[in-house]
Each structure stands twice: as C-alpha cells, then as structure tokens.
Amino acid sequence: MKTLFWLCWIVELIVVFWWIITDAKQKNLAPNPISYLCLFYLLGVIAIRLGLHWIKLSNIMVIIPGILLIGLGLIILISVLSRQNWN
C-alpha cells in the first residue's frame, strides 16, 4: 500500500505541475485557480501523512484520484501510440 500511495502521489504531483505550467504559458487566459488548490491539497496530504501519521486517511485521499489519473494517462498514451484522438 505504501508503494501505491507514493506512485499515485507522484503521478498527481506531476499532473498538477504540468497543469500549472501550461496555464502559466497562456497569454490570453487567466490561470485556473483550481490547479493551485490541487497543489495545496497534495501538500496537505503529505502533512497529514508525515506530520500527523494518519496513514489510512492519506492513502484514501491520494489513491482514489490517483487511480483515475493513471487510467486517464493510459487512455492518452494508447491514443498517442495509435495516432487517434482521445477526446
């Protein structure tokens, strides 16, 4: 479970940083504030896990959205490899 937590947390962190960076590159649109909230959420999860030692709660907070992001990433990867649109 520990490995799954860290795998999902790292995937979520990469996606959030990618989201913030792509929003920052936009010249005509304001950045989406939800991306920054997601970053604070992930930092809060680490604080809960390492500071309060609530392992079960931090696992739930990360694994549920992490599995969904990994699934979406696999769909995008398959569509890129097959040269088809994924949306």
Image: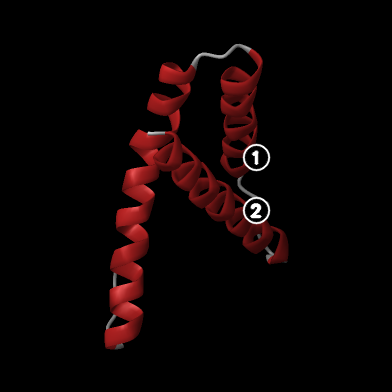
Query: Which colour scheme appears in the figure?
Result: secondary structure
Q: Is residue 14 above or below residue 28?
A: above
* Residue at position x 37%, y 62% in the image: 73
Residue corresponding to mark 2: 20
Which residue is pictured at 68% across the width and 65% down the height? 26
Q: Residue at x 63, y 63 (%)?
A: 22
Number of marks in picture: 2
At which x and y percent is residue 25? 71, 66
Percent of width and height locating residue 82: 27, 86
Determine whether the residue tagged by mark 1 lies in a helix, strand or loop. Answer: helix
Q: Nearer the viewer, residue 53 or 81?
A: 53
Left/right placement of residue 76 relative to residue 16 reads: left
Residue at the spot 40% in from the left edge and 43% down from the top edge = 66
Q: Is residue 15 above or below residue 52?
A: below
Secondary structure beneath label 2: helix
Quarter where residue 67 is shown? top left
Q: Earlier in the sequence, mark 2 or mark 1?
A: 2
Identified by mark 2, the residue type is: Ile
Position of residue 42 measured from the top left corner of the image (x, y, whole percent) = 58, 34
Q: Is residue 38 above or below residue 56?
A: below
Q: Decide if residue 12 is on the left or right side of residue 21.
A: left
Q: Which residue is mark 1?
A: 36
Type of the residue with mark 1: Tyr
Quadrant that contains the C terminus = bottom left
Residue found farthest to the front: 2
Q: Is residue 72 left or right of residue 21?
A: left
Callout 2–callout 1 Cβ contact below 8 Å: yes
Q: Percent x, y for residue 62?
A: 44, 33
Which residue extends farthest bottom? 83
